[in-house]
Amino acid sequence: MSDSSIADSALELTQSNDMTDSLMTKSSGDEHSSETGGRAGSSRASSSGNRLNDQKVKEFRQFLENHEGDRHLVVLQDFPDPDALSSAWGYRLIAQEYNITSEIVYAGTLSHQENIALVRLTGLPVKRWSQQMTKEKDLSAYDGCVLVDNQGTTTQLTPILERAKIPMLVVIDHHTSQGELNAEFIDLRSQTRATATIFVQYLKAGLLKLDNSESEHIKCATALMHGLRSDTNHLMQAQEEDFVAAGYLSRFYDSQLLNSVLQASRSKRVMDVIERSLRNRTLQNNFSIAGVGYLRYDDRDAIPQAADFLVTEENVHTAVVYGIVHDEDEELELVIGSLRTSKITLDPDEFIKEAFGHDANGRFFGGGRAMAGGFEIPMGFLSGFNENNEYTRIKWEVFDAQIKQKLIPLVDPEDGMIHTS
């Protein structure tokens, strides 16, 4: 089914439900009472969500009016996904309506083929800022920074901006709170499936009127549809508000452009990492755990793609894939991992936070949302490339064993031991 058909179906479903509700009120008896009670509960939840959105829209509009003429730096996570990229574009367009200029930046890399295609095919205005480049820039030119689809814990730019005393003005995210935030406008909705959904609600509320004659509006709507689709697992995990958002975007987005983005092919290096994850996986209690060794920084997005693949195996409900990612330019080395699950009673955010904890400053090494999560752990003193093959092998084995040591007690509480061959 095409994305346009999905969006149209969402609108038809909403209209059909509304008609059904109207007809059901005319029925009588216990069945009527029961169903009315169920709908009343759903209606209350929907009403509560609408009140929250109305309040946040009002606060956001006031914030934008107060900062007319500002210059903002919109900061994304190091490895921005479609939800982050599209939402940041939404912020930029909305801010323009209030004479606010915005630059969208990230410090890591775009390595997932769909993310690269999204940026290239839509002309999405995002730039990569390395740590060194950021240090050399005159950050005083910016009136503040904006965090979209993150809370500053997954970007290398946070400490640099803090040292430069750039105020945090806005945080808009759908992930669970990662710690105390100090910003002028905060919109955290952990029950919402995608940050793109939040931005579509801003658009619907009139903060920006999309125009089919504006090429940039069409391309941004297409990006938002991709972001919404991506973070709801092709709408399979979408809630009512996501379908309503998709229905709204269906009036503006370019289905052919989105199809071109989705048809981007996997690189050979990504396929190699998926093959490695299959070869190295450990199966226990319906979990699939796989370490894939060393990866180039530019191939980091192969890890979540491998997790996406492993979770489709028969009798597996959760997959965790991790590896050591090395960035030669920044002399940075991290253990990076991704979790994917189809088990509705498993909370990825709680699971990852319990497994890996937080750093000395109280920042968690990872977190998650519905059905997905990830973690990044700096290697500290042991970080750095070594040409000695035996040394690199030993280092990987140590970190591989340590990650498993953190995961196994949660996967199988009766087995706290790591079995190595």
Image (cartoon, rainbow, N blue to C red):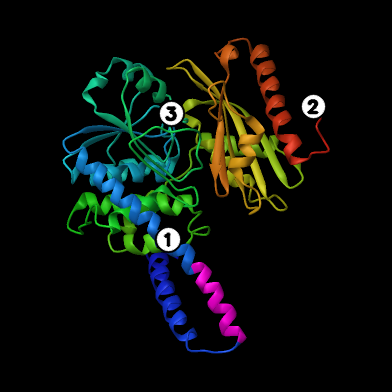
Question: Residue 12 at what x, y percent from top left?
Answer: 40, 74
Residue identified by numbered label 2: 420
Q: Nearer the viewer, residue 249 or 70?
A: 70
* Residue in the picture at 50% in, 72% down: 40
Amino acid carrying label 2: it is Thr
The reply to whether the magenta stretch includes residue 35 is yes
* Residue in the picture at 46% in, 86% down: 23
Q: Which residues are magenta?
A: 30-42
Mark nearer the viewer, 3 or 1: 1
- Label 3, residues with CA under 10 Å away: few <14, some 14-19, many ≥20: some
Query: Left or right: where does residue 94 sit relative to residue 20?
Result: left
* Residue in the picture at 57% in, 81% down: 33
- Label 1, residues with CA under 10 Å away: few <14, some 14-19, many ≥20: some
Residue identified by numbered label 3: 155
- Residue 241 tag number: 1
Mark nearer the viewer, 2 or 1: 1
